[in-house]
Image (cartoon, rainbow, N blue to C red):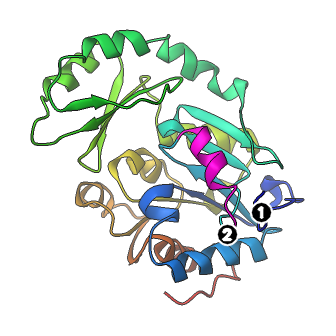
């Protein structure tokens, strides 16, 4: 059991500020000291700070991650690059919300097998072993990758994302982190102006573009920065990972208690 994240008593819609953050390179990025400072601040302000993980990771990873001492437990998760929308129980289990996933499942239409069959001979792609529900994911070798994979997926009526120059993901048409985060915000009755979206790679692009205050943390990949640097609602942080999140909370004035040095 995570000793830091225990009983979260205040409904997330009543909280002053909600952090909606990517994990790898973002919430889990930066120095040990910077991560601890942000995590301790969240725990000390649980009555006014909500937490949502918006990640490419699957629910099993999130359950394992939040069982570790020192990692705050979110109230909700947008996982699997936006194809899972779930609440997190007091025990740390991730439970999908059927009402929010219905159209995701319909758009996917059990396409896993046909995607795997269509891309089986594409050079530079290695199928990831995890059996995702509404996506198919590959490790990608950028030097060997055959870009015809993108056209094949387009012809199937599905979406694809290349991120960190080493992942290739196939998703239901129209669904990714940003649209699913907006669905969750609406479902929970959150004030979108009090939500901060944080990310660092191209699979975070739709989240940073969706209109809520956002931050591309220090160390973000250049193709992401090229697409968001001109957006007024996106803060391009100098500080890396968790410290970049703290920097953006302060820059936007989203919580009066944010006084971490970055």
Residue at 47% from the left image edge and 48% from the top image edge: 207
The residue that label 1 is drawn on is 5
So how many labels did they put on this image?
A: 2
What residue span does the magenta drawing correspond to? 58-70
Spatial separation of the CA atoms under disc 2 and disc 1: 8 Å
Q: Position of residue 54 (x, y in %)?
A: 55, 48
Quarter containing the N terminus: bottom right
Whether residue 25 is in magenta: the answer is no
Viewer-side residue, 90 vs 21: 90
Residue at 17% from the left image edge and 32% from the top image edge: 124
Relative side of 261 to 77, left or right:
left
Residue at 85% from the left image edge and 59% from the top image edge: 8
The residue that label 2 is drawn on is 70
Q: Quick check: marks 2 and 1 in contact, CB under 8 Å?
A: no
Determine the secondary structure under disc 2: loop
User: Going from the N terminus, do you reach mark 2 or mark 1 first?
Assistant: 1
The numbered mark at residue 110 is none
Viewer-side residue, 197 vs 169: 169
Relative side of 5 to 111, left or right:
right
User: Which image quarter: residue 128?
Assistant: top left
Question: Can you say whether 67 is above or below 32 in the image?
Answer: above
Relative side of 142 to 196, left or right:
left
Q: Position of residue 146 (x, y in %)?
A: 12, 28
Q: Position of residue 200 (x, y in %)?
A: 38, 59
């Amino acid at each position: 059991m995570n000793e830091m994240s225990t009983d979260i008593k205040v409904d997330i819609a009543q909280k002053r500020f909600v952090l909606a953050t990517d994990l790898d390179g973002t919430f889990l990025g930066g120095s040990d000291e910077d991560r601890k400072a942000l995590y301790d601040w969240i725990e000390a302000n649980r009555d006014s700070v909500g937490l949502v993980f918006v990640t490419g990771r699957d629910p099993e990873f999130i359950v394992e991650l939040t069982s570790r001492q020192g990692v705050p437990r979110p109230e909700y998760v947008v996982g699997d690059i936006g194809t899972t929308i779930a609440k997190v129980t007091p025990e740390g289990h991730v439970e999908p919300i059927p009402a929010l996933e219905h159209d995701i499942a319909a758009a996917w239409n059990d396409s896993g097998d046909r995607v795997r069959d269509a891309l089986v001979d594409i050079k530079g792609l290695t199928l990831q072993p995890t059996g995702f529900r509404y996506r198919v994911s590959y490790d990608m070798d950028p030097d060997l990758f055959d870009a015809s994979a993108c056209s094949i997926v387009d012809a199937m009526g599905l979406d694809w994302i290349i991120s960190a120059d080493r992942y290739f993901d196939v998703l239901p048409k129209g669904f990714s982190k940003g649209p699913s985060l907006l669905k969750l915000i609406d479902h929970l009755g959150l004030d979108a102006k009090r939500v901060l979206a944080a990310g660092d790679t191209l699979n975070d692009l739709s989240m940073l573009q969706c209109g809520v205050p956002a931050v591309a943390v220090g160390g973000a990949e250049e193709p992401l920065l090229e697409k968001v640097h001109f957006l007024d609602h996106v803060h391009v942080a100098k500080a890396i990972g968790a410290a970049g999140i703290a920097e953006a909370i302060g820059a936007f004035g989203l919580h009066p208690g944010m006084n971490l040095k970055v």
